[in-house]
Amino acid sequence: MHVPQERYDAIAREIASDDSPVGIDAKKTHIVIIHLLEDLQRRLDRIEAHLGLTNDAER
């Protein structure tokens, strides 16, 4: 997976934490990931609804 350097640097700055032994704010990082996953799920739900492919049993 290739991440353009400019985007990589922006993400690194966003999740960085000098207070963390690993250099990132784990809580903030997880919140960002979960937020993006929720956004993807909403987008996928809209696409599936548009195509008539709703199948909530698989979730």
Image (cartoon, helix red, strand yellow):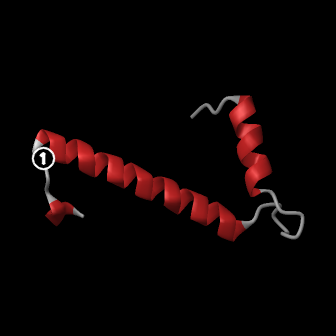
Q: Which residue corresponds to the image point at 42% horizontal and 58% vertical from the top-left?
A: 38
Q: If the image is split into quadrants, where does the N terminus sit?
A: top right
Residue type indicated by callout 1? Leu
Left or right: residue 42 versus residue 7 is: left
Above or below, 49 against 23 in this view is above
Q: Which residue corresponds to the image point at 55% horizontal and 57% vertical from the top-left?
A: 33
Q: Position of residue 31 (x, y in %)?
A: 59, 65
Left or right: residue 42 versus residue 57 is: right
Q: Which residue corresponds to the image point at 25% horizontal and 47% vertical from the top-left?
A: 46
Image quadrant where residue 28 sits: bottom right
Residue that carries the numbered disc 1 in the rendered image: 53
The residue lying toward the viewer, choosing from 46 and 19, is: 46
Above or below, 51 against 31 in this view is above
Above or below, 26 against 33 in this view is below
Crowd band around label 1 with a 10 angstrom C-alpha radius: few (<14), some (14–19), many (20+): few
Above or below, 21 against 41 in this view is below
The residue lying toward the viewer, choosing from 53 and 22, is: 53
Element on which disc 1 rests: loop
Left or right: residue 1 versus residue 43 is: right
Q: Which residue corresponds to the image point at 77% horizontal and 61% vertical from the top-left?
A: 24
The residue lying toward the viewer, choosing from 27 and 21, is: 27
Left or right: residue 37 versus residue 3 is: left
**Number of numbered discs visible in the structure rendering:** 1
Q: If the image is split into quadrants, where does the C terminus sit?
A: bottom left
- Residue lying at the far right in this picture: please name it: 18
Q: Position of residue 53 (x, y in %)?
A: 12, 47
Q: Position of residue 56 (x, y in %)?
A: 17, 62
